[in-house]
Image: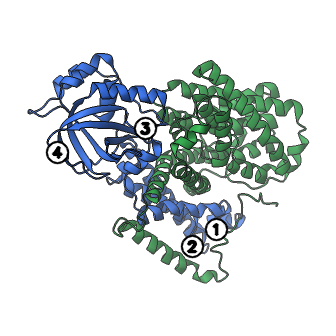
Chain colours: A green, B blue
Amino acid sequence: MRAPASYTSTPDTSTSAPRTGNLPAITAVVWVNLLLVLAYSGAFGRAVASERVENWATVFLSLMLQALPFLVLGVVVSAAVSTLVPAAWFERALPRSPVLAVPAAGAFGALLPGCECSAVPVAGRLMQRGVPHAAALTFLLASPAINPVVIVATSVAFPNQPRMVLARFVASFVAAVVVGLIWQRFVSPEILTTRIATLVEHHHHDGDAPRLPAFANTAIADFTQAGGYLVLGAMLVATFQALIPAATLDRFGGEGIIPIITLALLAVVLSICSEADAFVVAGLSRFSLTARLVFLTVGPMVDLKLVALQSGVFGRRFAQRFAPLTFIVCVISAVVVAQLLLGST
Amino acid sequence: MRPFDPPLLAIASGALAVRVGSTDLVFRYLRPSMRPWLIAAGAVLLALGAVALWDARRRTRPSDPASSRDGCHAIDQPTAAHEHHATWLCWLLLLPVVFGAIVDPRALGASAVAQNRGARQAFTEPFDLSTYLATHASGGQAPQLTMAQFIGAARKPTDRDLLHTTDVRLLGFVVAHPTEPSRRLLSRLQVGCCAADAVPLVIEVTALAEQPRWPAVDQWIEVTARLDVAATDRIIKANTDRADQFAMAAVTASDLRLTDGPAEPYEYP
């Protein structure tokens, strides 16, 4: 078996001591200390006097705590879907014709909540069971972008702009279907077939009988995987906010093409989970609504975390073609939809 | 069991969520309506972590007759399932726990106002000022308005006369003007979802009766004040010329009281 390198069997190099006999003891010491820190937090006084560091920590923790309920809801529902719904069901539910299957798969993506990390292996397994590649890829793009959890999060984050929710839904759905159709029409299936054949074991246990431990392990695996990247994203955003004063950001903000490009690239770099990105972008109100819609459309479909996952599951050749194609289609789709629905440029 | 095994990380995150959610700490970070969701998410993480730990423990004891079938299953999957998925990044989930304890950051205050000034627009919800003032005057005290309510009403031509002739109480903290230290500014942050999207609300106090000394930066105060129409007009004109102006309205204050900060430090639209 070839293990997909990016998310399987990457041992904890920091902790894989050869003397595994000591590991339970080390673990116990680490965790007892951690629990003490948690229990007595606040009792140490402020170790860091700098207001800037303090503001950084407040923003970082805010982002994490705000995202946490949505991330947990996402991984619980996606674990239920991947341990309770057999993948064969998707195959039966899709139309035979690939041209019809692509939008249908996009619509299924809208109904099935899940974060990026669960959509990637599910898409791989769908392809393996004979679902057209283009349809599985559209599912992969649509699912994390327009599912109910993301819709709710977006409407909470934009309480005063209800059209933003509709615009995000439409822009993401159109982008996912267009990428699927372009892939169907112009890209040789050979890029994926050889790789898919090697895809034996993966993230989820959809062959198993429904069991509580499988459910918990799947949910926790999704949570820790996404959570690590979420921490990285939250730290980057907090740093971004702490280091760059509003006046500097104004130079990139406002209307026009520069803020659009800025936020499109920011979405790729930040790699924030689709369940939380609306809250991040809602605070960037110095950027035009169009630029923020671009962020919300690009983020769940192309980001550093996803590209790494995709290279692991589908191979680097795939990712090299898929990511730039998706990025360009997302930006165009979001700009066009913003013109039509948000009435701004 | 290693220190950074996913079930342990889930338990740590769950414990943080429950700890923050069950105390007033939550108001430093989130709008109050998120509180039950945070506690629920923490509880779910604790439960999932407990199930996964129990499962991992069971797998490591294949001789246990109660789990012999799962022992075979465990041979099919040589390590516990979750150990496949851990990336090196997952230990980062401990950082919120550690930062929360060591830095123990306060709610955003004056320095965040200075950082965020100008570029973001606060949200002011339209409301009926005269009815509000009539129904909220209690026991001889002037009715209290939020900073956002006051700023919104100060920009509404029909409400300005009323604000100019009626005392209202405003609660906020002191901030310093970036270039003119003699100007007295009252501020509060408006938070839509979490502190990361905080937008400053700033009101300038142009005249102050019977209180010679203006408190230090970040001190919470309650002022009893009326709209200063001429100064507000100057501010509004300056704001349309330059985006990074500080204040959004101006008042003359007749009374100033030092207070402790409220449990909920931010205003919520």
Residues indicated by labels 4 and 2 sit on the same polypeptide chain: yes
Q: Which quadrant of the figure contains the N terminus of chain B?
A: bottom right
The image shows residue B245 at horizontal and vertical percentages of: 43, 36
Residue neighbourhood size for the residue with mark 2, other residues' Cα within 10 Å, grouped as few (<14), some (14–19), many (≥20): few
Residues indicated by labels 2 and 3 sit on the same polypeptide chain: yes
Upstream in sequence: badge 1 or badge 4? 1
Q: Nearer the viewer, residue A37 or B249?
A: B249
- Residue type marked 1: Gly
Mark closer to the observer (1, 4): 4
Q: Residue at x 46, y 62 (%)?
A: B99
**Cβ–Cβ below 8 Å for labels 2 and 3?**
no
Name the subunit of mark 3.
B
The image shows residue B76 at horizontal and vertical percentages of: 71, 64
- Residue type marked 2: Asp
Q: Residue at x 57, y 25 (%)?
A: A166
In the picture provided, is B249 more to the left or to the right than A5? left
**Cβ–Cβ below 8 Å for labels 1 and 4?**
no
Q: Is residue A97 visible?
A: no
**Cβ–Cβ below 8 Å for labels 4 and 2?**
no
For mark 4, what is the residue? B211
Numbered badge on residue B192: 3
Alpha carbon distance from label 4 to label 3: 34 Å
For mark 2, what is the residue? B64
Residues indicated by labels 4 and 3 sit on the same polypeptide chain: yes
The image shows residue B195 at horizontal and vertical percentages of: 43, 46
